[in-house]
């Protein structure tokens, strides 16, 4: 006890620490960011920032020992092909070129016959799709390097997509080599084939949760209790989904209809250029990712709004993934991803005083969305094809002093996931949740075993050690396990739900995600499949962090938690935002002598103040799983509270649809009670996201 008090006292000297009787808001209610770009954040620039142009920093990478060239992020020279190395599975036989071409030709003809004809004795589109996969698998195993071109040809001949989309999707440097690996390794006649055909075009029904086992080292203690609160509070930041767009071009079309907006558009061959409908503002727009000006404006606002500083920082910050912009695959490269990773972590180090504990997002890799289970070839070259990324980010985290050498080494072997104990006693476990993400093609492999990657074994081992040591744990990931069920694969989602249930509420004190770009929360319940949903069975809750990027139709935001250092429960959460609709009318200081003004970031709401009264929640009780279930009960009584939640979900964006129908209200309540994809899919669909008009049907 004396030792822990000593640590607490020492940490108080360098982190924001207060008694439980904190002020009503943590800092200023609003903050106007200076218009002048904080040029000192980077040591040198290829292109200096200006009131009508984004900067191009010259970034030296201390891990790779190189300076990234301008063409990596130059908005005027965006690449049209990814030239990174590609990986193919080992061919079963050393075929001559003529033999390999003959295999591919025969396979292509047979697949076309299966696809085009219905006299094959196959009863459904699903069985035809699986049959085509079986033929493709043979080709992938015998002539892997020839398969991407065959996939492009088949895609074009069958009209599966436009000719250009077929080319950009299935060429080897895009996803062609990836699909070749998957086809060569998949159980195409089993569950893997069902998943692949459901993914490719709903040819098979999306599988539900199948039977699987998770091995827990010990049964859940019968009388486990969580620690008592200490009465001391610290501040913890939660940032998510910055999606830095270093190729953002001020004045480009902000309201485009395809691909990335706010990007340079070359004139047509005859020299004509389309008229700009919405010139991209300096600080960003609703259909664009975050320019440097917005990223640094948000970071500059954190201190004044949260009452923290580099000298008096938050205890730590969470980053729940997605550093890199939503570039098309052919515009990405390893250098591009590494450049953005370095740039964002460098900016965070400049403005956030405490450690940053991060999870990778699905866009923080190349190829996009992919993370490969090591077991795909028994930890061989295919299983390690993305180790460059895990090495890079873990080394940067160590370089900036956020994790130690041993933790960095562990992260390199666990897909950049790690477990670390904060000096105040909380254990933070970060996960690579892309390994159960529906758009990670490799997650379609070994679908019957949600722990094929070993990620859940890692989590269970760390949680068991925490339970044995009496530690409290926060779990940090990117792709959420629940809500409306549209993001994770069902088996992986259910596996995480079971693990959280097993170690809650006595070990797991909080779960944190990003990915959706929206402000959301949901509850995990004990009992079979988590379907027995009540205040008494609520054991853990997940906080989904609002995004810094405005994409799509959202405001920019972030969150601060007020946390007890004994129980590590959250006692309040403050969400801050900036109104993107105001960015186009800002005075950027373009006239001589005009200082201009930047965007305003402001407090949007306190979770306790917004939801506590309706939930009849005690002032001194934590905002835990029971609290969030009580909020859903209050929503059942008072539909106005659903509208409030809906507004906050989009960070008060003027573009969010209203949630006024009974179907929408019931859906939101159901999503908040769904800790897994299986539960979320049972809710009314079409009301999950506020980024476009709802598609759900009213009752």
Image: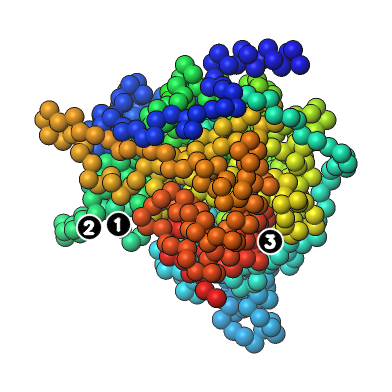
Asked if residue 329 is positioned above or below residue 158 in the image, the reply reads above
Whether residues under marks 2 and 1 lie with C-beta atoms below 8 angstroms apart, the answer is yes
Image coordinates for residue 508, horizontal then vertical, percent? 72, 38
Nearer to the camera, 627 or 688: 627
Q: Residue furthest bottom?
A: 119
Asked if residue 186 is positioned above or below residue 234 in the image, the reply reads below
Instruction: Give the spatial CA distance, label 2 vs label 3.
Output: 42 Å
**Which numbered marker is on residue 352?**
none
**SS for callout 3:** helix
- From the image, tell me which residue sits under label 2: 277
Q: Earlier in the sequence, mark 2 or mark 3?
A: 2
Q: Residue at x 76, y 16 (%)?
A: 1
Nearer to the camera, 259 or 656: 656
**SS for callout 2:** loop
Badge 3 density bin: few <14, some 14–19, many ≥20, Cα 10 Å? many
Q: Residue furthest left?
A: 592
- From the image, tell me which residue sits under label 3: 678
Nearer to the camera, 266 or 282: 282
């Amino acid at each position: 006890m004396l030792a822990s008090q000593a640590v607490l006292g020492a940490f108080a000297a360098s982190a924001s620490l207060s008694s439980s009787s904190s002020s009503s808001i943590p800092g200023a209610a609003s903050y106007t960011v200076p218009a002048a770009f904080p040029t000192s954040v980077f040591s040198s620039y290829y292109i200096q920032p200006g009131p009508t142009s984004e900067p191009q920093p010259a970034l030296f990478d201390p891990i790779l020992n190189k300076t990234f060239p301008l063409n990596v992020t130059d908005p005027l020279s965006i690449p049209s092909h990814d030239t990174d190395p590609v990986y193919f599975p080992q061919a079963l036989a050393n075929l001559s070129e003529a033999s390999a071409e003959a295999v591919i030709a025969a396979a292509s003809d047979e697949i076309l016959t299966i696809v085009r004809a219905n006299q094959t004795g196959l009863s459904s589109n699903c069985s035809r799709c699986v049959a085509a996969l079986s033929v493709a698998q043979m080709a992938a195993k015998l002539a892997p390097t020839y398969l991407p071109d065959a996939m492009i040809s088949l895609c074009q001949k069958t009209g599966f997509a436009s000719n250009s989309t077929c080319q950009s999707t299935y060429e080897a440097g895009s996803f062609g080599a990836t699909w070749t690996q998957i086809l060569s390794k998949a159980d195409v006649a089993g569950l893997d084939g069902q998943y692949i055909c459901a993914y490719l075009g709903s040819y098979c029904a999306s599988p539900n949760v199948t039977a699987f086992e998770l091995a827990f080292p010990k049964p859940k203690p019968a009388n486990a209790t969580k620690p008592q609160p200490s009465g001391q509070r610290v501040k913890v930041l939660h940032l998510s989904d910055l999606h830095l767009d270093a190729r953002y071009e001020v004045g480009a079309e902000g309201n485009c209809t395809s691909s990335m907006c706010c990007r340079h558009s070359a004139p047509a061959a005859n020299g004509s250029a389309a008229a700009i409908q919405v010139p991209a503002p300096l600080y960003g727009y609703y259909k664009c990712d975050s320019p440097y000006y917005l990223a640094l404006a948000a970071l500059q606002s954190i201190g004044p709004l949260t009452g923290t500083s580099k000298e008096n920082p938050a205890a730590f910050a969470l980053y729940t993934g997605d550093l890199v912009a939503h570039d098309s695959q052919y515009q990405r490269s390893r250098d591009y991803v590494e450049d953005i990773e370095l740039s964002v972590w460098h900016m965070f180090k400049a403005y956030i005083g405490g450690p940053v504990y991060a999870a990778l997002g699905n866009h923080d890799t190349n190829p996009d969305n992919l993370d490969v289970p090591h077991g795909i070839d028994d930890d061989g070259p295919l299983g390690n094809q993305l180790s460059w990324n895990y090495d890079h980010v873990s080394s940067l985290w160590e370089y900036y002093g956020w994790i130690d050498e041993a933790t960095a080494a562990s992260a390199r072997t666990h897909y950049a996931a790690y477990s670390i104990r904060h000096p105040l006693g909380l254990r933070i476990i970060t996960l690579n949740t892309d390994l159960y993400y529906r758009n990670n093609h490799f997650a379609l492999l070994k679908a019957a075993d949600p722990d094929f990657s070993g990620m859940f074994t890692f989590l269970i081992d760390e949680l068991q050690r925490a339970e044995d040591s009496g530690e409290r744990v926060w779990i940090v990931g990117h792709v959420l396990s629940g809500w409306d069920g549209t993001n994770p694969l069902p088996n992986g989602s259910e596996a995480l739900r079971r693990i959280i249930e097993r170690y809650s509420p006595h070990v797991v004190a909080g779960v944190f995600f990003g990915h959706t770009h929206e402000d959301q929360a949901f509850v995990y319940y004990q009992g079979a499949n988590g379907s027995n949903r009540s205040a008494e069975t609520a054991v853990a809750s997940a906080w989904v962090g609002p995004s810094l990027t405005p994409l799509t139709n959202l405001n920019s935001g972030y969150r601060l938690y007020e946390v007890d250092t004994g129980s590590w429960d959250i006692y309040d959460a403050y969400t801050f935002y900036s109104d993107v609709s105001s960015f186009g009318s800002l005075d950027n200081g373009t006239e001589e002598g005009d200082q201009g003004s930047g965007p305003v970031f402001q407090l949007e709401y306190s979770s306790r103040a917004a939801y506590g009264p309706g939930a009849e929640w005690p002032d001194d009780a934590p905002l835990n799983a029971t609290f969030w279930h009580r909020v859903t009960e209050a929503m059942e009584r008072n539909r106005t509270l659903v509208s409030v939640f809906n507004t906050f979900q989009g960070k008060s964006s003027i573009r969010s649809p209203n949630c006024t129908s009974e179907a929408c209200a019931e859906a939101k309540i159901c999503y908040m009670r769904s800790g897994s994809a299986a539960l979320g899919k049972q809710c009314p669909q079409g009301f999950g996201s506020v980024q476009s008009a709802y598609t759900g049907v009213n009752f």
